[in-house]
Image: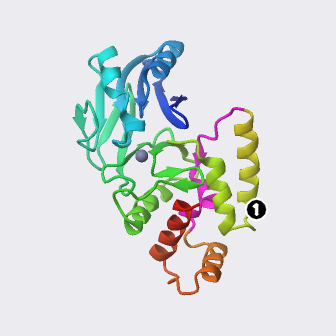
Amino acid sequence: MDVVPVPQLSDNYAYLVIDPATREAGIVDCAEVPAVLDAVDREKVQLTTILPTHHHFDHVGGNEDLLAARPGLTVYGFDDRVPGLTDKVGDGDRVKVGSLEAEVLSIPAHTTGHIAYYFEAQGVVFTGDTLFAGGCGRLFEGDAAMMIVSLEKLRQLPDDTRVYFGHEYTVNNLNFALTLEPQNQELNDKLAWAVETTDGGGYTTPTTIASEKETNPFFRWESSELRATLAERFPDLAMEDVAVFAKTRELKDNY
Ligand SMILES: [Zn+2]
């Protein structure tokens, strides 16, 4: 399997997912068509499928134009708000790109219909706006309790799973994370790497589940350093998972 990041809008990523055996491809989260079709031509693949993670405009805004340009595409989706939806899927369903197969994981809270595509055999997951490198999505249609369940599902994937996320927010996310865990060495190291990478015009995608366990405050609600920082700043905060996560999210919303 080849995964080609296709930058969209100001900081979004679409991803061209290629089956090397059949040269068929799917596109995860299409906001803008020209860059996607350029990638399809460059890679000399046949586009068959659109794989939207959720219905927000910056993830599906290109669906209708892409369908007009390439009629007959399969458009998977969990949420009826996905434009052009042809094949509605549910949690645990399997979707195909050529001979590649992914499992649909329902991971609500950013939106109620947010899903991930987990290519287990290849060790790859597409997490849209639920899990970023160093961060998680805002809670537009769910709460902290719902998001913890969604993120725990992703945290249970194998450590070496490559995580392709929806936005290049990594430097900002890790700077915020450092306000909670300034002593976290892996976090400091990853921030230095992310600054150097993006300054050079590179991408910080993909990350891995292991790296997120070490550096992402929204994967680290049990962290003693994170909890100590919150306890010092908010002496009345209940030190249980949902309250810790909700306070972390609230701080990030205002960061
Ligand atoms: Zn979104």
Residue 200 horizontal/vertical position (percent): 74, 33
Give me the residue at 30% from left, 17% from top: 68
What stretch of residues is rendered in magenta?
A: 201-220
Report crowding for label 1: few under 14, some 14 to 19, many 20 or more residues within 10 A (C-alpha): few
Residue 139 horizontal/vertical position (percent): 41, 59
Note whether residue 70 is visible.
Answer: no
- Figure quadrant of residue 221: bottom right
Tell me: 93 left or right of 99: left
Tell me: 198 left or right of 150: right
Give me the residue at 30% from left, 22% from top: 73
The quadrant of the picture occupied by the C terminus is bottom right
Look at the image and say whether residue 213 sits in the magenta stretch. Answer: yes
Label total for image: 1
Look at the image and say whether residue 82 sits in the magenta stretch. Answer: no
Q: Residue furthest front?
A: 254
Tell me: 184 left or right of 103: right
- Closer to us: 171 or 225: 171
The figure's colour scheme reads: rainbow
Please tell me whether mark 1 sits on a helix, a strand or a loop. helix
What kind of residue is marked 1?
Answer: Gln
- Which residue does the numbered mark 1 point to in the structure image? 185
Q: Residue furthest bottom?
A: 236
Q: Is residue 63 above or below residue 163?
A: above
Q: Is residue 2 above or below residue 172?
A: above
Disc 1 C-beta below 8 A from ligand 1: no
- Closer to us: 139 or 130: 139
Note whether residue 140 is visible.
Answer: yes
- Closer to us: 55 or 255: 255
Residue 189 horizontal/vertical position (percent): 76, 54
- Figure quadrant of residue 212: bottom right
Residue 225 horizontal/vertical position (percent): 67, 74
- Closer to us: 87 or 58: 58
